[in-house]
Each structure stands twice: as C-alpha cells, then as structure tokens.
C-alpha cells in the first residue's frame, strides 16, 4: 500500500546512526531518500538496526540538540491503539497534513499494529516550537510521549512479522495546522493559569529569616532533584516514583516551581487546584527531612549561610 514519491526538497531531514549504541551519526537523508527507505525496509536484529534522528546535530544528547537549535521533521511513535494505515491517514487528513510517511515498527504484528509517522516540514524549526507541535501530536494520537524528547531516536524501517508503509506526496507544513494550534494554545493557557495559582500559593509561605526559602532555591536545581529522587522525564512532564499508574503527572517550570496531580505526591509541597505545588525546597524537605519544614530550613540555612543559621526561623 504505497503512493509514488514526487520530487521533494533535497535538504537533509534525517540523521542516521549505525545502531542504537552509536554516539555519532554516519549520514544524512533528505525527504525523498527517507520516503524511499520506507519501501525498502531492512530485516535485521534490533540491536543491529539503523536508527534515525529528526535533528542534524550529529549527536543524540539533549545538550547537543539544544546547542544545534533546530529540528528537521515531526514524528509520532504509535505503539498502541492497533490502528490501520487508513485510520492514521484519516487522522492526518483531518489535521490538513498532506506530506507524510507511515511505516510499521519492527514489533508490529497483524494483531497489534505499531507505527512510526514522519511528517515533512517546509523549514527547520526551533526546539521550542517543535516541542509544542510534538506535544500536540502526542495528545491527538494518544501516542508515546517519548517522541516529545528532543534527543529521541527511532528505528529505521525494519521488517518484522507485519510490515506496511504509505507515503503521501502533499505539501510540507509551512504553518501550524489550526487543530494543532488550538491544542498548543489551550495547553499554554492552562499552564499559565496553574502557574499563577502556584505563585499565589507559594507567596503565602512566610519566613522571618533574611536568608529565606528563595535564597535556598537559588542554590538548588529542581530538575536535578527530581532525577535524584527517582522521577523520570517524559516530554514536558515527569513520572513520580510514588505512582503506580505509570503516567506522567508532574510539570516542572523553568524557574524551578512545579505542579503535580499525582495522588501519590499529595504530601509534598502545598495544595493547589486539585494537586500540589512547590519548588526545590519542598522536594528536599520531603525526601531528605521527613517533610519537616522547620528542620529542613534550619539545616539548609546552616549549610548555605552559617551566620544566617544562628537566627530564628519561621515558616
């Protein structure tokens, strides 16, 4: 089930890696070459299979991708739902996406179909814009959120028990499709609203010490603490080590504040809008000081500002 590929832009859109273990890429493919590869899948063990990246930094670390600053394709990692190619085509048509390729993953079977969807974009886009688009696609397809990671790679077409592919030769995306834009704007509005509530909630904490909680937060990294305490990043969100659902439910903002709707995190931080919120201080207080704020503040002040530690604290 395929459509002939028409003449397309010759700019590279995929970096190839020899296998999953390779640190550096070993080549580039343009859109025409990518589409052709879908018609010629490999048949090789997974640990030997070629991998693709939708960024051209030559590496597959987040830092390298951020430094590079551009992404070259959109994609969807669809391992659930058992959709047919026709059902996927209908979803893409409804989004007014017309230049794309679909291929079955190595693990796909007739009873449990799994897919990778590649979507051509007219121009390379910045990481933040790409992130928004990927998140919107993940929501619409209810797909794996790993594809929202800047550094995430995928396996090149590699024939398993079931293999199909399809190429649509339409027009590369030049602006954000309206349905994706609606999701992006809605997500931004919700994040802004919860952030405003978090700000009000955290300001309610009082501290008579001149060396206050914010001074402590300035010396700590929420992202580093989340990793230390066993949280796992999935796109913009984190999965709590305390949850059994396996779903990502904590959002960390760029200034170190966070919001969690994990029921298992409800003892951390302060309650707000059906969840809890906090900052680095709240995380270290819960995980290292038994959630005792007085003890945590006194100890951290003593470590970070010995003179300040001699003063009386109150929170």
Image (cartoon, helix red, strand yellow):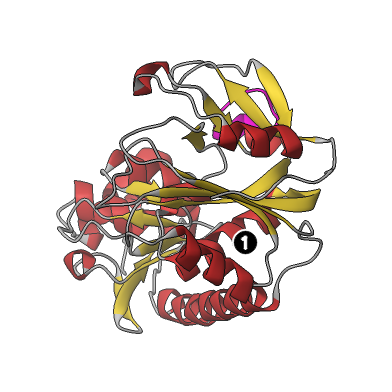
**Residue density around tag 1, few if under 14, some if 14–19, many if 20 or more, within 10 Å:** many
Task: Answer above or below: position of 186 versus 142.
Answer: below
Evaluate whether residue 222 shows in this view.
Answer: no
Q: Residue at x 73, y 68 (%)?
A: 176
Q: Which residue is mark 1?
A: 133
Q: Is residue 68 above or below residue 149?
A: above
Q: Quadrant of the C terminus?
A: bottom left
Q: Residue 215: x, y in percent?
A: 49, 54
Give x and y (percent) for residue 93: 62, 71
Res 49 quadrant in image: top left
Report the magenta residues as a range: 55-64
Is residue 63 a member of the stretch shown in magenta?
Answer: yes
Q: Quadrant of residue 69?
A: top right
Question: 288 left or right of 305?
Answer: left
Residue at horizontal 35 percent and vertical 51 percent from the top: 79
Q: Is residue 293 left or right of residue 211?
A: left
Q: Position of residue 159 (x, y in %)?
A: 41, 31
| Secondary structure state at the residue bearing disc 1 | helix
86, 254: nearer the viewer: 86
Could you tell whether 173 is left or right of 217 in the image? right
Image mark count: 1
Q: Nearer the viewer, residue 239 or 210?
A: 239
């Amino acid at each position: 089930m395929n459509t002939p590929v028409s003449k397309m832009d010759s700019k590279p859109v995929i970096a190839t890696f020899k296998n999953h273990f390779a640190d550096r890429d070993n080549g580039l493919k343009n859109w025409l070459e990518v589409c052709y590869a879908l018609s010629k899948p490999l048949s090789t063990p997974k640990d030997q299979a070629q991998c693709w990246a939708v960024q051209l930094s030559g590496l597959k670390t987040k830092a390298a991708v951020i430094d590079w600053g551009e992404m070259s394709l959109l994609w969807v990692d669809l391992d659930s739902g058992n959709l047919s190619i026709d059902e996927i085509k209908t979803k893409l048509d409804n989004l007014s996406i017309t230049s794309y390729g679909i291929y079955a993953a190595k693990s796909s079977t007739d009873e449990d179909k799994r897919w990778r969807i590649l979507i051509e974009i007219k121009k390379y886009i910045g990481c933040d814009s790409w992130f928004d688009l990927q998140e919107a696609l993940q929501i619409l397809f209810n797909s794996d959120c790993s594809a929202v990671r800047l550094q995430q790679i995928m396996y090149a077409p590699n024939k398993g028990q079931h293999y199909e592919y399809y190429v649509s030769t339409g027009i590369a995306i030049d602006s954000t499709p309206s349905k994706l834009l609606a999701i992006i704007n809605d997500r931004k509005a919700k994040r802004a609203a919860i952030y405003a509530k978090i700000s009000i909630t955290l300001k309610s904490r009082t501290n008579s010490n001149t060396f206050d909680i914010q001074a402590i937060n300035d010396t700590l990294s929420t992202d580093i603490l989340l990793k230390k305490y066993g949280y796992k990043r999935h796109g913009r969100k984190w999965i709590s080590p305390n949850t059994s659902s396996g779903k990502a439910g904590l959002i960390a903002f760029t200034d170190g504040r966070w919001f969690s709707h994990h029921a298992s995190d409800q003892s951390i931080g302060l309650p707000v809008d059906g969840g809890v919120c906090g900052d680095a201080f709240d995380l270290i207080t819960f995980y290292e000081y038994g959630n005792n704020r007085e003890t945590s503040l006194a100890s951290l002040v003593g470590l970070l500002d010995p003179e300040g530690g001699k003063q009386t604290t109150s929170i």
